[in-house]
Image: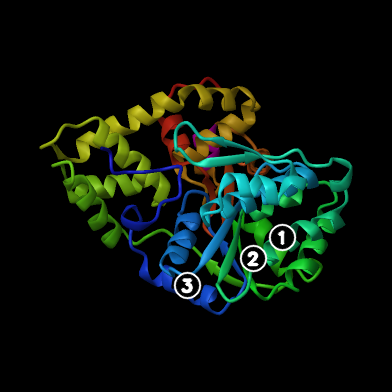
Amino acid sequence: MNPFHHGVAVTGRDFCPRPTLVSELGSHIEARQNCVVKGIRRIGKTSAVLEAIRARKKTRHMYINCWGKQDIRSLATAIYEAFLIYQRRKGLSLEKIIRTFAHLRPKASIDPYSGDTTFSLDLDREALTRPQSLEAVFDFLASEGGKQSLVVVLDEFQALLEIPEADAVMATLRGTIQLQPEVTYFYLGSTRHLIDDIFNSPERPFYKSAATVTVEPIERGPYGAYLQTRFATGKRVISADAMEAVFDAACDITGDVQQLCAELWNCTDPGARIGPDVVPRGLQRIHHAEHESNSRIIDLLTPGQVRALIGLARVGGKRPNSKEFLAASGIAQPSSVTKALNRLVERGLVYRDSEGHKFFSPFFRTWLLATDIPT
């Protein structure tokens, strides 16, 4: 069985040990200190938080993904569903859940792949149209706090800024959460400037309301050693040079490193020695799988935006107004580069940090370099 997992949260033996990070997160859990956990996508935020929770056996948790919630009702539904899943995980029978929470009109089903119980709800549309209606929803979470530690994980928390009346929603949440000292809230965010705005701007309700932990890439030394032990479970040996090539291609992003390692496993047999020459084969498999979706993205962009992406892929984004970048992208004016990159940031394809512009997906970059794209 392939030991490399990506696109899902992992804990236990599938989690690469990150003792300092897990200890820091755990100290906030023990202190019942609300906490912001930020870092780029696929860096391992959710896995680290869940591992810190798992390491404290008496700690319970609810997980709520805020991504894609378009209105107050969809957010409330996600919270109620997480609450019912939590009740099931506690050992409550389906019959008792459906009877006890009949006012939510829950319908239970079994996921055919995972075997887990899932719920769908038929909530009153009229009763969940105002931000203030979320107070009653969060009271459900507070009712589970007490002597035993409870952590509520709100993943992709910055996505709530897309909900209509976002300011009122945030004010309601802050006003309710601050009255729940028996519950610890972890706010996870992958869009740094948005999550920083929520918690660091004096005009925002959540200003300085939580501790902050930043999840950085795992150091190559310990991560490489861990990955080598995973390859060894299938009688495969990966060289140090190949491991460096994997880290370079994946830009040290935890989930992307795992994805490339999974493909290297898939394209080799037990007993194989994986050298740097094998890494391009793994990348080709990723490019093939993602070609259709990447091509659709390109089709939705303007020629100038595509050229900016190509320039970024070729020379990096430290100096996007330099002559080198202009030559690599084929764009004549620095102002056009700036405009294109700003639009790509808005589209979520690129982000900017202290080191310049970067791709959210490192394999989108390698795909661009490997594909002949007309501009």
How many discs mark residues in the rendered view?
3
Which residue corresponds to mark 3? 26
Which of discs 3 and 2 lies nearer the camera? The answer is 2
Which x, y percent locates residue 170? 78, 60
> Tag 2, which secondary structure?
loop
Which x, y percent locates residue 226? 25, 56
- Which comes sooner in the sequence, label 3 or label 2? 3
What is the quadrant of the N terminus in the image? top left
Which residue corresponds to mark 1? 140
Q: Amino acid at mark 2?
A: Glu
The answer to whether residue 336 is visible is yes
- Which comes sooner in the sequence, label 3 or label 1? 3
Residues in magenta? 325-329
Q: Taking 229 as reference, is 143 above or below it?
A: below
Task: Give left or right: position of 114 versus 78.
Answer: left
Task: Give left or right: position of 208 versus 237.
Answer: right
Residue placed farthest to the bottom in the image?
31
**In this view of the protein, which residue sits in the foreground, 147 or 128?**
147
